[in-house]
DNA sequence: GGGAAAAGTTTCCTATAGGAACATTGTGGC
DNA sequence: GCCACAATGTTCCTATAGGAAACTTTTCCC
């Protein structure tokens, strides 16, 4: 009963009708992991179903506005990251999201993420800048891990990239590294000030 | 008939909240009226159904995230308003780009690429740093174009990103942009010194 | 290594979102 | 008043969102 599905494709800026919400799910998953929550915990806190959250994170559904709203509150996500009308253009970016909230920027003990793109649908790479808090850590055992690849470039500061399979890698401004993000990894700032890092992540 | 459907009745555990759900429709209607659009016009512009918009404005449905996103773009709604109620129009997600108008540039071509990873096999993203010579210009009719997506971050200097379909975008250190690289594009340095740019490219 | 518990995914089903067509309510001209 | 006709509201139907539970995978222990 669906002879024509065409009309949808016409107006939308992004061409492909591929159901890939692509980055939205990843963002939510990352935010959840950052807070150290399991699917169950996060879902309960947001008053949604565990399976629903799983589907959203895997981009297997087109969630309702209400559901997303609850998740954003629970995960303390910056709202503009999720939308921001980039005026029907595929050009978007610039660090203009820090905005309003002023301080209530999503922060965890260790990282402070700032997404560098808007229009999450239709994008496959996820670029963002992280501020890595200065702190002392003798050893790292709490790996970040997600299927895909990741490129990292140090904008400022000094840090050590700990990875699961290789020896720690000391990095400073201008250095970059490319690795399989399925391998556990994590950063620790080794300078007095926070370190700034640019990531580009590709989920497989 | 009046289905005073307490939409949230079953789901929302917290009672002290839930205003957004009721206000959403009014906000959207107001925004539409402000722009002097009829239901039909607005719905068409947002690529949604007329009846759907009607229901949303009358709070008779719980629209999907995607639908709301389209409406916000069409009506140029500020995102935080939808989440933070009583938001005093925090200027967010503003496109505070400085747009470079004008078109006279001399032409040359010489980027200076430096690949940031080795072992290209098994990698899907391609990160590299380009030095864009001062006063360097790419020819407009000879766009760079390749299937895929591209993320660009300005490390230093000032430049203008020219694209095939959008207005020139002036960028300086710290700015970034994400675009479909199938769209013709090219950079021109506008500062005295060379500009340094970090690219991450993803072929499809 | 193996078994158990936890985390995550998929399946199945119901309620409903979204859109086309139909119905109703303005609104201005005569 | 009555008639166009334009704008909005409602009905009807299908595809699917969302949740419970079954199932699978991963993570810990011993």
Image (cartoon, coloured by chain):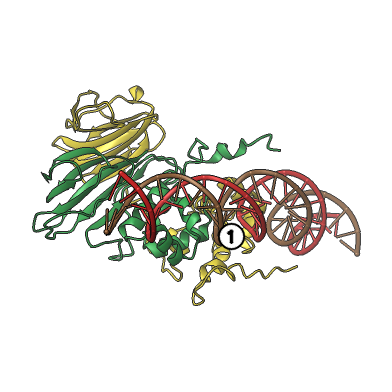
Chain colours: A green, B yellow, C red, D brown
Residue located at (58% from left, 63% from top): B25
Residue located at (31% from left, 31% from top): B124
Residue B175 position, x and y percent, is 26, 45
Residue found farthest to the bottom: B16
For residue B8, side relative to residue A108 (left or right): right
Front-most of A43 and A139? Answer: A139
Q: In this picture, is A39 found above or below A176?
A: below
Front-most of D11 and B73? Answer: D11
Q: In this picture, is A103 found above or below B102?
A: below
Front-most of A141 and A79? Answer: A141
Residue A107 position, x and y percent, is 27, 61
Q: Is residue B34 visible?
A: no
For residue A64, side relative to residue A176 (left or right): right
Chain for disc number 1: B
Instruction: Determine the image quadrant of residue B80.
Output: bottom left
**Which residue is tagged 1?**
B62
Residue A180 position, x and y percent, is 27, 38
| Mark 1 secondary-structure assignment | loop
Q: Is residue A53 visible?
A: yes
Residue A55 position, x and y percent, is 48, 50
What count of labels does the image hold?
1
Instruction: Determine the image quadrant of residue B88.
Output: bottom left
Label 1 CA crowd tier, 10 Å (few <14, some 14–19, many 20+) = some
Residue located at (12% from left, 45% from top): A168
Quarter holding the C terminus of chain B? top left
Front-most of B117 and B121? Answer: B121
Quarter holding the N terminus of chain B? bottom right
């Amino acid at each position: 009963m669906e002879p024509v599905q065409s009309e949808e494709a016409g107006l939308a800026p992004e061409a492909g009708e591929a159901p890939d919400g692509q980055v939205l799910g990843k963002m939510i998953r990352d935010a959840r992991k950052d807070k150290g929550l399991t699917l169950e915990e996060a879902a309960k806190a947001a008053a949604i179903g565990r399976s629903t959250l799983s589907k959203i994170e895997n981009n297997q559904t087109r969630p309702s506005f209400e559901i997303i709203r609850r998740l954003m509150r629970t995960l303390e996500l910056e709202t503009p990251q999720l939308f921001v009308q980039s005026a029907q253009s595929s050009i978007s970016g610039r660090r203009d999201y820090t905005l309003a909230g002023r301080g209530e920027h999503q922060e965890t003990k260790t990282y402070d993420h700032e997404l560098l793109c808007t229009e999450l649908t239709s994008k496959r790479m996820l670029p963002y800048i992280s501020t890595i808090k200065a702190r002392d850590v003798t050893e790292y055992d709490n790996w970040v891990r997600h299927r895909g690849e990741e490129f990292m470039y140090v904008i400022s500061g000094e840090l050590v990239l700990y990875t699961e399979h290789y020896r720690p890698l000391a990095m400073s401004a201008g250095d970059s590294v490319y690795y399989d993000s399925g391998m556990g990894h994590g950063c620790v700032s080794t300078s007095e000030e926070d370190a700034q890092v640019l990531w580009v992540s590709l989920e497989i």
